Image: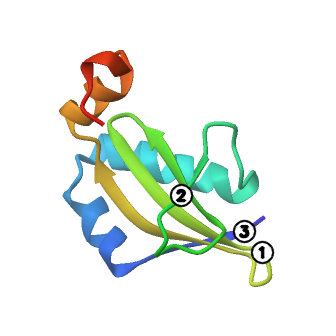
Amino acid sequence: MLSDRYSKQAQKQIKKIDWGISKKIIQKIQMITVSPLPPEAKRCKEEKFRENVFLISMNSYDVIYELDFEEKTLLVHKISEIKKVERICSHCLSAFCDE
């Protein structure tokens, strides 16, 4: 089992979210400490992140977290709302999207 930590940015972001939703996000993060790579987790491909950084979507929020198996920690980097436009675009046919 991994211990969970939150970056200062993630701490600020979770405080801004409705209590009911933030509670669900925290519960999901605690579940990830037990099973660090759930099937819905996607590896972050952004260059600024390290190899063990993943994104998981829940409700209308994305959570970016990093796994450190040597120190047995899960660091939550960012919690951000998925914009409605991004959600709609990700589910539409690629012929209708500008890429």
Horizontal side of residue 89 vs 46, given as left or right: left
How packed mark 2 is, by other alpha carbons closer than 10 Å (few <14, some 14-19, many 20 or more), is some
**Helix, strand, or loop for circle 1?**
loop
Q: Three-letter amino acid code at disc 1?
A: Phe
Residue type of the residue flagged with mark 2: Cys
Which mark, by number, is residue 16?
none
Q: Quadrant of the N terminus?
A: bottom right
Q: Nearer the viewer, residue 91 or 35?
A: 91
Snapshot quadrant of residue 29? bottom right
Residue at the spot of label 1: 69
**Circle 3 is placed at which residue position?**
2
Q: Position of residue 51 (x, y in %)?
A: 65, 70
| Residue annotated with mark 2 | 44
Give how far across and how far down residue 99 sits, in percent.
Answer: 30, 37
Q: Quadrant of residue 74?
A: bottom right
Is 85 left or right of 78, judged from the image as shown?
Answer: left
Contact, mark 3 vs mark 1 (Cβ under 8 Å): yes
Q: Earlier in the sequence, mark 3 or mark 1?
A: 3
The earlier-in-sequence mark between 3 and 2 is 3
